[in-house]
Amino acid sequence: MVPDVEVFDRRRGRRTRRGTVRSGQRMMPDSDVMRVADVAVTTPLRTAIDLGRQRQPARAFAEAEAMVRAGVAVEEILRELPRFAGYRWIRQFRELAPLLDPRPESIPESIMRFRWLGTGQPRPEPQRPVVGPQGQEWRLDLGIDELYFAVEYDGKEFHEGAQRQQHDAERRGWVARNTPWMVKVIGKENLFGHADFESRLPGWIREARSTLGERLRRGHRWYDDVGD
């Protein structure tokens, strides 16, 4: 579903009254506004901060991270945050902002990383490289290098269709047989199973924690299993 367009008026007491937009008033300096095709819009930096100031932490994190992926530097965001003292949900975003990373390639990957970061398990890194059979580089969405454990998200945009699914199955089968990596695959129903992202610990996180615990107990002996 396409979300409503957000249209705000910088003049006191003014708003756009139209059913297809969300409207209100926003007081902001001229430095927060730019023009694109003669339309006044917030700058990428201001947009990133506004997206990060949402009630649901997972969405705030993922959408702000999308702006970082688009080119807004995390350092810029951190420098700018002090002037937003007192703004709604800014305290929450102050905690999230240092964790933003441009490497996740989609909103679901960012939400997946956000939820993992909250488990207290070893911190994962996005886009872990694996060399394939022809010397090509494959990248696993999210993983811990020292434990060779990764999680991948299969969404409709890039993974739907018999041909793509077969390619994914062959790639992951080769990784399982020829590398130390273990890959856990989750879909939309696992990641977006609850309207409130923070209401319950998702099942795939519980499974990941169990697997990680086993990996930690076994340590580097995992190498011995490859090729058996």
Image (cartoon, rainbow, N blue to C red):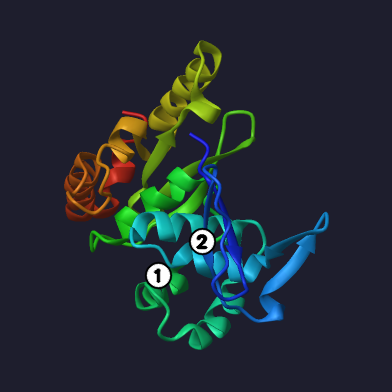
Residue at x 51%, y 61% (from the top left corner):
64
Mark 2 element type = helix
Q: Nearer the viewer, residue 28 or 117?
A: 28
Q: In the drawing, does residue 158 fall left or right of residue 226?
A: right
Residue at x 62%, y 74% (from the top left corner):
11
Tell me the quarter of the picture where residue 85 sits. bottom left
Evaluate if marks 2 and 1 touch, with contact meaning CB atoms under 8 Å apart: yes
Local packing at callout 2 (Cα closer than 10 Å; few below 14, some 14-19, many 20+) is many
Q: Image height check: is 36 above or below 170? A: below
Task: Say whether disc 2 or disc 1 marks the residue closer to the N-terminus.
Answer: 2
Judge whether residue 168 can be spotted in this image: yes
Instruction: Name which residue type carries label 2.
Output: Ala
Mark 1 element type = helix
Tell me the quarter of the picture where residue 38 sits. bottom right
Q: In the drawing, does residue 187 fall left or right of residue 100?
A: left
Q: In the drawing, does residue 62 fall left or right of residue 35?
A: left
Residue that badge 2 annotates: 64
Judge whether residue 180 can be spotted in this image: no
Instruction: Name which residue type carries label 1.
Output: Leu
Tell me the quarter of the picture where residue 69 sits. bottom right
Residue at x 32%, y 60% (from the top left corner):
117
Residue 80, horizontal then vertical, whole percent: 57, 82
Residue 92, horizontal then vertical, whole percent: 35, 73
Residue 19, horizontal then vertical, whole percent: 52, 43
Residue that badge 1 annotates: 96
